[in-house]
Image: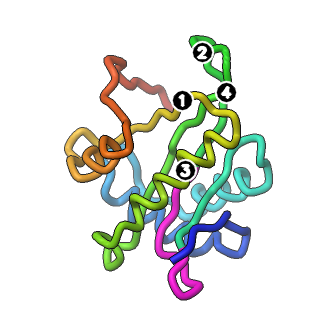
């Protein structure tokens, strides 16, 4: 298994992974065209973020993406960990952990001083994975408005 940057040719498989992820999450629904547009935007604009994929026998089996912004609290660049998903038949093999470790290292290499992420409040296995890599619960409560 190896982790590499995603390419435009990976988009169909990444959309499949995102459909799996969004079918598990309470706040989102799969929408192939919306996901494709978002992926194209990230891949074509490295200042926006980056996508890493886990490949097993050259097949994409997992992904994670980071989006970059600036924190006024820190006065420095930070990242949002937007999506982490591994194919169900590949889970339990350490792929998610490896993707997360690589995302953290990649954020460091991109001069990010914090990574923030959201996870479903009921997804205890994901929360445990993140905690093993040093993530902590925040006192902040996420809120959003759709425009």
Out of 136 and 15, give the one closest to the viewer: 136
Q: Earlier in the sequence, mark 2 or mark 3?
A: 2
Q: Label 4, on which residue?
A: 77
Q: Label 1, on which residue?
A: 114
Mark 3 is surrounded, within 10 Å at the Cα level, by few (under 14), some (14 to 19) or many (20 or more) other residues, namely many
On screen, residue 6 versus residue 117, left or right, reads right
Mark 2 is surrounded, within 10 Å at the Cα level, by few (under 14), some (14 to 19) or many (20 or more) other residues, namely few
Q: Could you tell me residue 130's position as x and y percent?
A: 35, 45
Q: Could you tell me residue 107's position as x and y percent?
A: 61, 42
Per the model, the C-alpha gap separating discs 1 and 3 is 12 Å
Is mark 1 in CB contact (under 8 Å) with mark 4? no
Per the model, the C-alpha gap separating discs 2 and 4 is 8 Å
Residue 89 in the image: above or below residue 114: below
Question: What's the magenta region?
Answer: 55-65
* The magenta stretch spans residue 62: yes
Q: Please tell me whether mark 4 sits on a helix, a strand or a loop.
A: strand
């Amino acid at each position: 298994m190896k982790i590499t940057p995603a390419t435009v040719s990976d988009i169909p498989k990444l959309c499949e992974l995102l459909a799996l992820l969004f079918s598990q999450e309470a706040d989102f629904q799969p929408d192939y065209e919306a996901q494709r547009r978002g992926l194209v935007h990230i891949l074509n604009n490295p200042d926006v973020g980056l996508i890493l994929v886990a490949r097993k026998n050259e097949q994409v089996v997992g992904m994670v993406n980071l989006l970059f912004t600036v924190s006024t609290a820190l006065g420095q660049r930070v990242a949002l960990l937007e999506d982490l998903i591994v194919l169900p038949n590949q889970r339990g093999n350490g792929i998610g952990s490896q993707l997360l470790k690589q995302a953290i290292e990649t954020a460091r290499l991109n001069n990010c001083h914090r990574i923030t992420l959201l996870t479903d409040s009921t997804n205890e296995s994901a929360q445990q994975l993140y905690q093993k890599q040093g993530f902590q619960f925040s006192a902040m409560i996420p809120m959003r408005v759709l425009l």
